[in-house]
Image (tube, coloured by chain):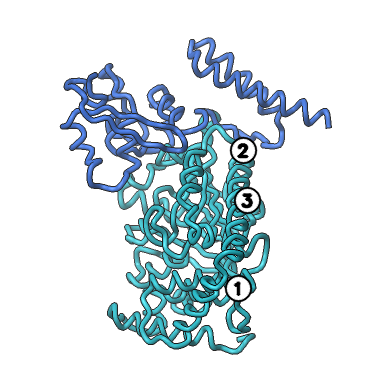
Chain colours: A cyan, B blue
Amino acid sequence: MEIETLHKKIGSWLSGSGNESDTVLSSRIRLARNLDKQPFCHLASSSQREETYNIVIEALRSSNFFSKGMFLRVDELSKINRMLLVERYLISLEHAQGKISSGLAVSEGEIISSMVNEEDHLRMQVLYPCLQLHEAFSLSREFERVMSKKVKFAVNKEFGFLTSCPTNVGTGLRASVMVHLPALVIDEQIGQILQAVNKLGLAVRGTFGEGTHSIGSIFQISNQVTLGKSEEEIIIDVEKMVKEIIGYEQKAREKILKNRRIEIEDKIGRAYGVFSNAKVVSSKETIDLLSILKLGVDLGLLHSKNITNDRINASRIQTQPAHLQKFAGRELTHHERDVYRAKILKDIFSRKRGK
Amino acid sequence: MLCDACHKFEATIHYTEIVGGKVIKLNLCEECFKKKELVNTPFNISELLAGLTQIGKDVSENTAKCGNCGMTFLDFKKKGKLGCSECYSVFRTQLLPLLKTIHKSPHHIGFIEQSDLYIDEKNDKVRLEALKKRLSETVKSEEFEEAALIRDQIKELRKKIETKDGN
C-alpha cells in the first residue's frame, strides 16, 4: 500500500451492501487517546512532538493492525497528497495543515486508521460500511486494547480518558453515522428533523458544505457527550436516532414515489444524462446528481446495470479535487478539473460490469 | 446584570447557544462580546468553553499552575484546551462545573483499559462499588451537588442490576 497509488482504489468501507445500505453510507468510531504526562499537542515543543510521534508510531507499528497498510509522515507529504487523505476521510482538515511531526497509520482497505499528533496524541478510527456501529466499536476496542499494552494512556478513575479538549474527555468516543436523506430534503422535512436531533443532544451536520446547507443530502449524525455515559449507551443512543431518522426517510420516499413519481424519474434520467454526456461538471453538481442517482438505484427506478451503489460511492470520492489531480498526474486549474471530472464520471459509469 | 466575563460592566448582550441539548446563556458587556468575536466568526468551541468557565473571583484559582506542563488555569480559559493529563487533577475543582455543563455528568462510567485501573464495563457491580465509594468521598468533602448526581447514577445502576438479575 502506498500513497502514490491510493487514489486508484476506494476504501473497502465504501462497498455498498449491508444493513440499511439504501440510507446509511458508513459508520465511524473514533477514540481519542493521549500519552500519560506528555504535554498535549498544542502545548508540546517541536522536540516533544517528535518524541510523541516516535513513541506512538513505534506502538502502532508493533500492533500488527497495519502490517499490510502504511505509515505516513503527514508533515512531509505534498499538499495534494494531504488533501487526498482528507477526501478519503483518513485525516481532518486540521491535520492536513501538516504541522511538525504529524503522522498517520492506515490499514489495508482503510478500515482502521490513526492520526498521530492531531488535537490528541492518538485519534484511532474505524470505518465500516452501512450501519455497523457495534461492529466498528468492537474492532476499535480491540485496537485500543492492544495499544494500551504498548503505551501508557492518560487516564484517571474520575474523568476516564483525558483529552486535550474537555469536550472529548471520558470515553474519548465519537460515534458517527453518515446517512443519505434525499426524500426528506425533497419533501422539505429535513429542517425540522435536524432541529429535533440537535435538541436531543446529538450533533448533525451536512458532510459536504456547511451546517444544514448540505449538498448531496448527506448528513452526519454523532454524539456530543463523551462523559457520564458508557460507550455502550453512547452507541445505542446514536443508533436509535439513526434508525428513527431513516424511518422518516423511508416514509418520505413512499410519499414522493406516490405523489411525485414523474418528477423524481425525470430528475434521475437527467442526472444519468449529465454523467453520460456532459463535458464540464462542477463538484457541487456531481455530489447533487450522485445523490439523485443513488435514490434512483435504491427506489428501483434506475435499471442500468452500469449504475450501482459501489460506483456511485467511488465517484463521490474519486471526483474530488485532489483525486482528480492524482489521476491527471499534475496540478489542474479549476476549469480543467471540471472537464477532467466529466471524463472520469463518464468512464466510471460506462465501464463494463466486473471491472 | 453584570457581564459574565469581566464582572465590571453592565451586560447588554445576551447570547444563547445550544450545545449537546443544553442551553448555555452568556451575558456580556459590549467590550467582552467584541473580544469573543462571536459576531462574525464561526462558532468556536474554545471560545465557548472559555465563556463557560467561571471566572474565579479568587485570584489564586486563576494562577494555579500545573507542575507537570506549566499551564495555568487562566491559560486554559484563554485556549479552551488543557496542557497535559495532570491538568485534570490540578484544576479538578475549577473543571467540575464546566464538565457538568457540557456532559451528562462529570464522572466517567465507561471502560478503562489500563490494567491497574481496570473496570469491566460489563461488570455493573464493580461499577456500583466504585460509585458508592465516590459518593461517600463527595459527601465528606461537602460537594453535595456532585453527591446528588452520583446518587442518581447509583439508583439507575441498581435498577439495571435488578432487572438483569431478574431475567
**Vertical relation: A24 (above or below) B111:** below
Q: Same chain for marks 3 and 2?
A: no
Q: Secondary structure at mark 1?
A: helix
Residue placed at 51% from the left, 71% from the top? Answer: A263
Q: Secondary structure at mark 3?
A: helix
Point out residue A341 in the picture as x, y percentages from the top left corner.
40, 81
**Vertical relation: A64 (above or below) A337:** above
Type of amino acid at the residue the image marks with label 3 = Lys
Residue named by callout 2: B111
Type of amino acid at the residue the image marks with label 1 = Val
Q: CA distance from mark 3 to mark 2?
A: 26 Å
Q: CA distance from mark 3 to mark 1?
A: 21 Å
Point out residue A252 in the picture as x, y percentages from the top left corner.
58, 57
Type of amino acid at the residue the image marks with label 2 = Phe
Which picture quadrant has residue B13? top left
Residue named by callout 3: A243
Decide: few, some or many residues near mark 3? Use Cα within 10 Å; few <14, some 14-19, many ≥20. some
Viewer-nearest of discs 2 and 1: 1
- In this view of the protein, which residue sits in the foreground, A125 or A131? A131
Q: CA distance from mark 2 to mark 1?
A: 41 Å
Q: Which disc number belongs to residue A297?
A: 1
Mark 3 vs mark 1: which is more N-terminal?
3
Q: Same chain for marks 2 and 1?
A: no
**Quadrant in the picture for the C terminus of chain A:** bottom right
Decide: few, some or many residues near mark 2? Use Cα within 10 Å; few <14, some 14-19, many ≥20. many
